[in-house]
Amino acid sequence: MLDICVLNPFFYPYAGGTERVLYEVYRRLAKRHNITVISGALESKNRESTDELEGIRIVRLKTTHIRVPSLPMPFPAMQGLPGAVQKEGADLYHINNRYLYFLNTINAIRKLKKTLALTLHDAMPRNIGAITDSGGYLYEMMWGRKLMGYADLITAVSKNTLVTTVPGRYRERAYVIYNGVDAKSYKHRGKKDAKVRKLRGGIGIDENTISIMNTGRLVAQKGQVYLLRAVAEFKRRRKDLDVNLMVVGRGYLKETLEYMAGDLGISDRFCIMTGINERDMPYYYNAADIFVSASLYEPASLSVMEALASETPVVATKVGGVPEMIGGCGAYARPKSVAGISKGIESIIDNKKRAQRLAEKGRELMIREHDWDRIAREYEQRFEATLRN
């Protein structure tokens, strides 16, 4: 039995991609090991606390939440983190957000002479924008690569993330462990399912409407501005079809996207959905006829995997680790290509039987390669092998 201390500034009930991965992996490992997560306090209860969730012990530190307009979540500054790390005395410490852990935390772990694992949930930023790209590069040069040098084990959520981010001198201790998907929840339900029909009706989608879905933070990286233009361009070319675009997410671009929709003349067939309970998300994928990921940068996409598991046909920009998730089970477009995204949508509409075959293969791929039990075992095996060496 291992004692594992997980370090991430956010944890359940925060709903982010990294947080989902940690919850799914560690609620499984907690059945066989002692798991502690050190995280920031919730904004609503900003105080130190200790509680438990499905066998996971959660230590929350008093946190200053700094709001940054361009970020969907606050920047957390956790108080007393090095002391909390040393207090645990775990066999292995697992860092998951390399942007928020610095030398004081690393030194606290090194003084204990314990094993350090680092998971790269994000690759070095590329093709997002000059400021983001250059800022990410400077971070990696100044600290990110030093942090990797301290790690006994490095895991990355895609081959692309590993190759673009981990220097060659550290790759002998670097491995790919993909993210997973809950195929029991994310599955094909069909448009006749009562909850799916109610959802479609609630946002004005009838049986003759083609519903396009996108989910993700409303930030430049996710490329929703290009998706809106692609949908508007498609509607101009295919006036015979009624198309609705549903974007699920929140972020600083919300007002910009709503303004764009009006300017493009599609505001009556466009909506942004926020505050959706995780339990309801599988029904949203089923309510959609097509899922589109228009990201400019994507180390690994949980939303693409959820769409595939739901047997919803996928169009995605060919960036980062996305092709590793989809393989040959979807349609691709170049990032920022309005015409490419539009043609991808059209290829699915005009070739429904082929699109459905690909969607079915996509679900088979998710079940075979991305089951959460399998992913949790891969982490467990890597941790145990590193501790033995």
Image (cartoon, helix red, strand yellow):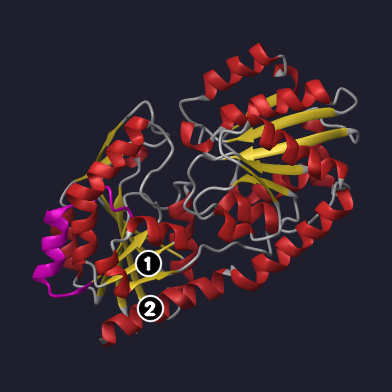
Q: Check disc 2 and report its element: helix, strand or loop.
A: helix
How far apart are labels 2 and 1 at the CA level? 9 Å
Would you name the residue on which mark 1 appears? Answer: 155
**In the figure, is residue 173 to the left or right of 110?**
right
Q: Residue at x 73, y 59 (%)?
A: 187
| Mark 1 residue crowding within 10 angstroms, few (<14) / some (14–19) / many (20+) | many
Q: Earlier in the sequence, mark 2 or mark 1?
A: 1
Residue shown at 82% from the left, 59% from the top: 357
Q: Which structural element holds mark 1? A: strand
> Camera-side residue: 177 or 167?
167
Q: Which mark is residue 382?
A: 2
Q: Position of residue 252 (x, y in %)?
A: 46, 26
Q: Which quadrant would residue 272 be assigned to in this image?
A: top right
In the rendered image, residue 181 lying in the magenta stretch gets the answer: no
Q: Is residue 72 visible?
A: yes
Image position of 232 with respect to 77: above or below: above
Percent of width and height locating residue 107: 11, 62
Q: Residue at the location (31% across, 46% down)? A: 41
Decide: is 95 above or below 333: below
Left/right placement of residue 355 relative to residue 178 reads right
Q: Which mark is residue 298?
A: none
Question: Which span of residues is magenta-colored?
Answer: 96-115
Inspect the image, locate mark 2, and give the three-letter code of the amino acid beneath it.
Answer: Arg
Give the residue furthest to the bottom. 388
Quick one: 52 or 334, which is closer to the camera?
334
Count of numbered circles on the image:
2
Where residue 330 appears, as percent x and y from the top left, is 71, 53
Q: Give the quadrant of the N terminus.
A: bottom left
